[in-house]
Amino acid sequence: NVIRREESHNRGITHQHLTDLERIHELLLSKVLLQYPDIELSYLVESWKSKIKLVMVYENHLNPIYTIDEYEQSTDEEKRQLILRDSTAQIEYVDKIILDLMSISPPISKRKKHEELVRIITDYRDLQHQKYNCVLNSDESKAQEILVAIQSQIKRLNGFADEFILTEG
């Protein structure tokens, strides 16, 4: 009611108002919607799906910014700089994706799936930070382990994307 009054008097709706409204919505409807998901407004789910699809167009950005030939023809220091630049680009790109995902308010029925996606991408970003620090500090003992973890995380992300396409269309 407070928000309705603010709006009717042409006053601004604050972030706190939206947070309160979301909390009220969740308290009142979450249990009902989890029990009867068919009553959730389809346009909310469709809007969420389309936003997630836009965010998940990531494939080309998760590949290194350098070619294998460029890497192989480089000196050790040039290789190190290529990896640092690549990690920085990856971190910046993934930070943007996380920010985009955090700005999306998922429907209650899709909240767990949304949180899972945010967790997968956040874990990938954290691994990129580890790779960056490993290369920056010339810590070769952890390098292979981190690279394997990054590849595993990319497979996990691709698996999520495949599942999303199959289940959400």
Image: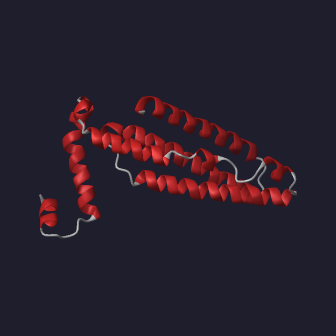
Residue 23 in percent (x, y) is at 25, 50
Quadrant of the rendering where the N terminus is positioned: bottom left
Above or below 149: residue 38: above
**Would residue 164 be seen by someone viewing this image from the given angle?**
yes
The residue under the point 35% across, 38% down is 110
Above or below 48: residue 84: below
**Would residue 142 be seen by someone viewing this image from the given angle?**
no
The residue under the point 74% across, 53% down is 66
Give the side of residue 60 with respect to residue 22, left or right: right
Total marks in image: 0
The residue under the point 41% across, 47% down is 51
The picture quadrant where one finds residue 156 is top right
Residue 147 in percent (x, y) is at 70, 43
Above or below 156: residue 23: below
The picture quadrant where one finds residue 42 is top left
Quadrant of the rendering where the C terminus is positioned: top left
Residue 26 in percent (x, y) is at 24, 45
Residue 35 in percent (x, y) is at 24, 29
Q: How is the image coloured?
A: secondary structure
52 and 27: which one is in front? 52
Give the side of residue 51 with respect to residue 137, left or right: left
